[in-house]
Image (cartoon, helix red, strand yellow):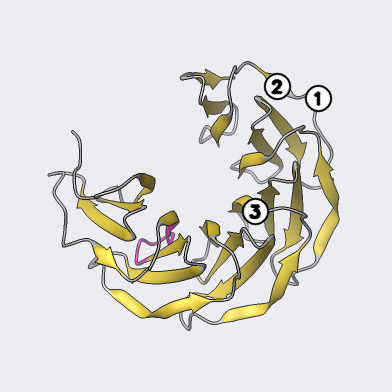
Amino acid sequence: MPLKGHSNRVSCAKFSPNGLNIVSGSWDNTLCLWDTMTGSAIREPLKSHSNGIVAIAFSPDGSKIVSGSFDTTLCIWDGKSGAFIGEPLKGHSGEVIAVAFSPDGLKFVSGSADNSLRLWDVMSGAVIGEPWKGHSDCIRCVAFSPDGLKIVFSSADKTLRLWNAQSGAAIGESLKGHTHWVSCVRFSPDGLSIVSGTDDQTLCLWNANSGTLIGKPLKGHGGQITDVAFSPDGSKIMSSSFDMTLCYS
């Protein structure tokens, strides 16, 4: 059923961990929180950003939502009521394009058009340490490893980087294998592999420990790859594309 509540493009949406709610973010500067059983909005649109919202995530326990915006800030919301918590979080000088919670829900990471990654404390909203810089173009996607020890982020500079989530130190060199910006990245459920998708219409599979490319880039799409996902047991990969198809391997 179509869910109607926004007045501009809906750029992102996520299920709550228990599957009872959906949160959506829009270029109308708002989030909407939805009941999945009825399809109705739980409350009026959530307002705090001054420009379009392009990234959202639920915490693992569903108690918090974080949003990133073209206005360069992040906001934290109550995952059940939708209430805004604290003040907009400032730490980037460019649009916030990607967000992800740590598996324990105590931290979240943000990636920005200012080419940097920042780590935040969920309870206080305080930024942790200095910006992590290793890319020459905007960050497109971020993901924590299942054990929370590593962060991978991908960039419009055609590369990926791995970081130690505790120390903030880069792990190895840039992961190079794509010929266009890397739009999506995910860890496998066991944390041993990483898959990335890009505007060059290919997927790359990487060893998460060594950062080396596993085999050759995977081809099957005729357009930009928009998202990738591992199956729960890690044996399959699915990708979606602007070519109007899904690939499953």
**Image position, residue 222 (x, y; %):** 59, 17
Dot label at residue 218 = 2
Q: Secondary structure at mark 2?
A: strand
Name which of mark 2 and mark 3 comes first in the sequence. 3
- Specify which label sits upstream in the sequence, 1 or 3: 3
Start and end of the magenta stretch? 56-64
The residue drawn where x is 77% and y is 32% is 179
Q: Amino acid at mark 3?
A: Ile
Q: Which residue is mark 3?
A: 139
Q: Residues under labels 2 and 3: Cα distance?
A: 22 Å
Where 65 falls versus 121 (above or below)?
A: above
Q: Secondary structure at mark 3?
A: strand
Q: Residue 98: say if magenta.
A: no
Number of residues whose C-alpha sits closer than 10 Å to that of mark 2, classed few (under 14), some (14–19) or many (20 or more)? few
Nearer the observer, disc 1 or disc 2? 2
* Observer-nearest of 87 and 72: 72
Q: Which numbered marker is on residue 37?
A: none
Q: Which residue is mark 1?
A: 215
